Image (cartoon, helix red, strand yellow):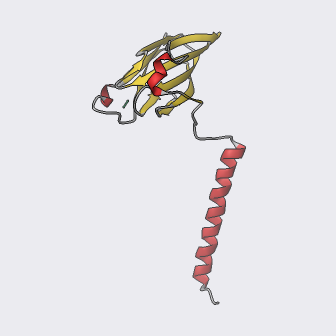
Amino acid sequence: MHIHVYERIVLGLTVAILLFALGALGGSVFGSHIHLPGPVGRVDPRTLRQTPPFDSPGVREVRPGQYEAVMIAQTWAFVPAELRVPTGATVTFRVASADVTHGFIIERTDANLTLIPGHVAETTATFREPGTYLILCHEYCGIGHQTMYGRVVVQ
Ligand code: CUA
């Protein structure tokens, strides 16, 4: 079978690009250990408020400078609505939804979660600069979606 030279070039480029993309994917997963965030646990949204640690949401110090914040997302608020930590604190957020899918993004940090009902999501952020950091819901979750926010006050 005769394959035109231009077709050979295009086929060769296609295979080269495919191999490059697979190599980049393999390098990021196995070399740099980059993974999609997965749920760290499961919880029944109907009994979320009675299930530890979500029965007492809030922030607590686990080691000097290291904090754990337990939060509930619900239509249309975060519980608690405000967290206070000192400047330089590293905070691990454990967040779960009590109803529908919500988003969780903290401005000026890398914290960005999708809160799927039934899943416990976790992310960590360090607050080096004092100030107020807004926590926003970035998944449309109903008529009050745009009013759903919280804040981290760093002082
Ligand atoms: Cu919660 Cu949008």
Counting every numbered tag in the picture gives 0
Query: How far across and down, in percent of the image, does residue 2 sit?
Result: 63, 89
Displayed quadrant of residue 4:
bottom right
Q: Is residue 144 left or right of residue 16?
A: left
User: Which residue is painted at 58% across and 41% down in the image?
Assistant: 36
Judging depth in this view, the residue of 151 and 140 nearest the camera is 140
Q: Is residue 84 visible?
A: yes
User: Which residue is painted at 63% across and 12% down in the image?
Assistant: 62
Q: Is residue 148 above or below residue 65?
A: below
Displayed quadrant of residue 82:
top left
Query: How far across and down, in percent of the image, does residue 131 sit?
Result: 45, 15
Judging depth in this view, the residue of 117 and 132 nearest the camera is 117
Q: Is residue 129 left or right of residue 137?
A: right
User: Which residue is painted at 65% across and 66% down in the image?
Assistant: 16
Q: Residue furthest right?
A: 31
Q: Is residue 108 visible?
A: no
User: Which residue is painted at 66% across and 62% down in the image?
Assistant: 19
Query: How far across and down, in percent of the image, does residue 145 sit?
Result: 32, 30
Ligand 1 sits in which quadrant?
A: top left
Q: Is residue 28 above or below residue 96?
A: below
Q: Is residue 123 left or right of residue 147?
A: right
Judging depth in this view, the residue of 19 and 148 nearest the camera is 148
Q: Quadrant of the N terminus?
A: bottom right
Q: Is residue 117 above or below residue 132?
A: below
Q: Residue furthest left?
A: 143
Query: How far across and down, in percent of the image, does residue 42 sit?
Result: 56, 30
Q: Residue furthest bottom?
A: 1
